[in-house]
Amino acid sequence: MIKTYSVSLVILFLLSCSLTPQDQNSNKTKYVGSRYVAEVHAKKSCFNNIKQLLYKSTDPDLIISEIEEAKNVYFDLHLDLNNLQSLHPFNSRVTQKRDAIRSIRKKIQSLQSKLYRSGKGYKTIQMEYSYIGETNYLALDPFFKDKRIYYLNEAEREQFKVNISKDGTLRWSNGSRISTRSRNYGHSGMGIFVMDNEGNIYLHVDYKNQYNGEGYIRHSSFLSGLPISAAGELLIDNGILKTVTRKSGHYTPSKSINNQLLHHLENEGVDLSEVDSIKGY
């Protein structure tokens, strides 16, 4: 019944988009100058409304379920790739597995985009292809030839989650205010961060040293190489955000992508009036 109703609405919208008042009076009506431009924009706006109607009629829970299924496939493929660590990064078996990982990641990003268009979550971007395999020396990027990157599991990731208190300050899970430069780690005291498509923010400060001696933490570590909604560096002083960059070689986010972080923080009550946003990469 709901689907029939939605289809009927779409048909009505299509008819209204196709027929302007001038069209109804005469099929030979000609448009000139700004009037023609206005008609074109009106029709584009009309068709955009149809797209929004279609996306909003999509069941978000169904999309979320599909995303979780795709993630399970992704992690299985990633495990398979790790088992090939004795091979050369350019070995055909490694390449096939790397391509399969890129393919399933693309599917996850596509589903997340669908979820975003339905009104849930944020846009996402993928990690650069050359970094796939970085957890076991199989990445194509020569920087990781002798450097292993560690991917956090769900439990480990929680200790790096940024919480926003009622007063708009940024805090760790234990309630203490975050200060990224208290121990002078990172670039000018900044910590690296990512935000997922649900608006969860993860931050790591001591990324110059290996995590538990198992590997280094980089932007890809937080979500195990999956798509992100923002990435870069944060400078936080006693819970107050001072600086944001989009410096991330793994994801190279655009300004519009990273603006999602600022929008999210503002919606959560964080004061951004004195925040310095730096381009980075």
Image (cartoon, rainbow, N blue to C red):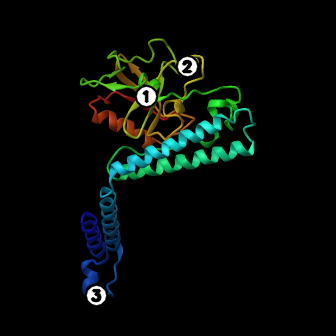
Which SS class for mark 2?
loop
Residue 161 lies left or right of residue 98; in this view the side is left
Q: Which residue is mark 2?
A: 211
The residue carrying mark 1 is 202
Q: Residue at x 64, y 26 (%)?
A: 148
Dots 1, 3 in contact, CB < 8 A: no
Looking at the rendered image, the quarter that the C terminus falls into is top right
First of labels 3, 2 by sequence position: 3
Give x and y (percent) for residue 161.
40, 26
| Residue type of the residue flagged with mark 2 | Tyr
Disc 1/disc 2 C-alpha distance (Å): 15 Å
Mark identifier at residue 7: none
The residue carrying mark 3 is 26
Amino acid carrying label 1: it is Tyr
**Which residue is at the front of the view, 16 or 30?**
16
What kind of element bears circle 3? loop
Whether residue 56 sits left or right of residue 231 in the image: it is: left
Q: For the residue carrying disc 3, how many other residues have a C-alpha within 10 Å: few (<14), some (14-19), or many (20+)? A: few
The answer to whether 114 is drawn above or below residue 76 in the figure is below
Q: Which sits earlier in the primary sequence, circle 1 or circle 3?
A: 3
Of 224 and 277, which appears nearest the observer? 224
Which residue is at a point 29% across and 69% down the rendered structure image?
Answer: 7
Q: Residue at x 50, y 40 (%)?
A: 253
Q: Residues within 10 Å of mark 2 (few under 14, many from 20)?
A: some
Label 3–label 2 contact, CB within 8 A: no
Q: Is residue 186 above or below residue 139?
A: above
Residue 275 point in image, percent of width and height: 37, 28
At label 3, the amino acid type is Ser
